Amino acid sequence: MKRARFLLGSILILAAAAGAVVPQQWTLRSFDDFLRGKFSGIAVTSDGVLSLASPEEKIDGPSEDFYLSFVMTPEGTGYLGTGHGGKIYRLDKDGKADLYFQTAEMDVTCLLLGQKGILYAGTSPNGKIYEITASGKGQELFNPEERYIWDLALSESGNLLAAVGESGGIYEINPEGSGRLIFKADQTHILCLKIEPDGNIVAGSGGSGLVYRLAKNSGKGTVIFETPFEEVRSVAFDPDGNIYASAGGTVKASRGETVSAPIPVSAGNVDISISVSGEAAAPVQSSTGQGARPAAAAGSREPGAIYRIGPDGLARRIWFSPEEQVYSLFWNESERKIYFGTGPKGRLYMIDREEETSLLLQSEAEQAYACIPLGPRLYLLSNNPAGLSRISADRRLSGEYLGPVWDAKLASVWGRIDWEAALPAEGVLQFQSRSGNSAEPGSTWSEWSPPYQKAEGEQILSPKARYLQIRALFKSTSAKAGPALSRLSVHFLPANAAPSITRIELLGPNEVFLKPPDMDEAIWGLERRLPDAGRKTDDMRMIAAKKTERQGFRTLSWSGEDENGDTLVYSIALKRDGDKDWRTIEDHWPEEIFAFNTVYFPDGVYQMKVTASDALSNPAGREKTGEQTVGPLLIDNTAPAVKNLQVARAEGQLSVSFTAEDGFSAVKDARVLIRPGDWRVVFPEDGIADSKTESYKFRIPLPPGADGLVTIIVRDVVDNTATVRQVF
């Protein structure tokens, strides 16, 4: 796995480290970058070069819901199995289709050409095998009483091998139609089988994605590889003894295991983690044209992978996608490469001997369901919609690449578009752009711009918007050469969005945080202009700050955000009720907490305002601000007054009465002390201290040895304290 390419790949977004509003750039330059787009007649090599793909000639096939199986004779006659009408068609060299045989089941899931021109067909959902000798002439050869016949093969002895579900096994059927179960799998389906040059059978299962090997003539099966996926759909061999297996569907744990950690997987050269479950998924009836094959529904996105299992039994994953399933694969001996088709984007890929992946083409259908080689040509069977096409080794004369939708996050002014490409004399390469403010292009987007043709760069003509999309138009007058694009870059300038205060909180009276790590020395966020206190210069650390109390202090905390990622500074202002103007008490404040001593402000009710500014990250005149207010804030540094205090001693008790008054705050509590006794709480006459004026009248027992002095403390809600003493 080559991590270095991914670090340069993906979609590069170059911006200033500080996150200021500066020109930025999007770039596509690697295979993984370009793969995010849509390909119409365009291929991309493993090293990230776009070029015109091989021609795909559509063959007018019969009008059926699904094309499920296809085989060809060496002379070029094709046989097409369909669903859900259970028909088999014969296609001549010109692609003309005639009904060849009608089965009694819904789906013809597999076809095999046998000796003497015999055509074998496997069906579902009432799995039977037919032997067809001519047009309209055929008979049921074998009924294993299984629901599905998934694959067929011929053994060295000339007997027919059938992979079945839903009890999961392999049958051997002789030419007379007598069959026996030669392998019973632990899984519910055997989805594919292929015979090795030495006569051993390799098979893939569904339920849990296992690769089996059955020794020749022994009937004993062993698991040679267990994938973390639900199914193994197809297998292939190369002359070096390697086995290639495609796996896909739900990612799961091995049988009997519970997986709690992610399984590391790789998409090309991209590391991804997929969480897995230890529960097996049952096959489901699918609407994708696969009968009841366990598979993703049309348009759904499930992961898929290809593994190479060496002669030494070691397996290596050579391809992975988090959103594409592999439907078929085969070994191309003339090129010594693996070809495979996927869904739901209908793509045909190739992997070379260095395990590098190239995209050969993307069809109009969702599933590249099967790929059948015949000489230098390939026949591609597609579904959703059903179709059949012939792919030659030449090069198209035109094609289009539709890039991914780029999101600038904010409305942006578009700059230049530039690219790197090899452009032969026969080739033409043009680009167009469109923009909009919805994530999906639609009628609200701008029209495609006039073509850009200067590789050194042209001004993008699309309107200012949040989203941008580029398409590249490839043309050539020769099938031997054409444009080859290796880099595409777009420059843009995001609008400067105003910052915002997303949270603002005024702590309670006297509440402060001690700035860590100096828990006993510095108040966190303390204003800088105190006449009687300096400000320590050590850095604030976001670790467990200690919350404590300091008389007369108030603390304000907030959170600021900026969509551009700009550096923010803050100003803190205060306004007393009845005043018109805000008075700034701190400016260019870098922190999101501020504490100040209210003793330097007149008593009253105030509002506080925090204003965020992105001036540090933008040129003068382009800065923006956002603000938020909080209140009311009561500043009250005047203690309550104790009035009309009267005390009288009689019969071992002291009668006390007084009135507590406060100009701004409610009286919170009162306490009384007669030494050598303890402090005692006393309640006002109405039973609750909740107003600016409270009347108290109570009797308190005198402790033995009372010193003849009563002390009374009254506090308001901001903890201003009044103390009075009276001799009795």
Image (cartoon, rainbow, N blue to C red):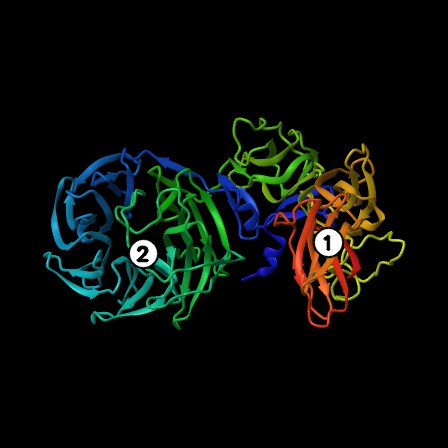
Left or right of 517: which side holds 465?
left
Q: Position of residue 304 (x, y in %)?
A: 41, 54
The extreme front residue here reads 651
On screen, residue 707 versus residue 201, left or right, reads: right
Q: What's the residue type where badge 2 is placed?
A: Ala
Residue 259: quarter of image = bottom left
Secondary-structure class at tag 2: loop
Q: Is mark 1 on a helix, strand or loop?
A: strand
Query: Residue 218 appears at what percent x and percent y?
Result: 21, 72
Vertical comparison of 170 with 407: above or below: below
Along the polypeptide, which appears first: circle 1 or circle 2? 2
In-image side of 26 versus 379 (left or right): right
The residue type indicated by label 1 comes to: Arg
Q: Mark 1 points at which residue?
A: 715
According to the image, label 2 marks what residue? 281
Q: Whole-percent x and y of residue 709?
A: 77, 64
Nearest the camera: 611 or 549? 549
Q: Quadrant of the C terminus?
A: bottom right
Q: Which of marks 1 and 2 is in front?
A: 1
Is residue 548 at all visible to an observer of this figure? no
Vertical order, 394 against 279 (above or below)? above
Q: Which residue lies furthest to the right in this view?
A: 531
Nearest the viewer among 675 and 432 is 675
Q: Nearer the viewer, residue 18 or 666?
A: 666
Q: Where is residue 360 in the image (x, y as percent from the top left)?
A: 47, 46
Question: Callout 2 environment at 10 Å: few (<14), some (14 to 19), or many (20+)?
Answer: some
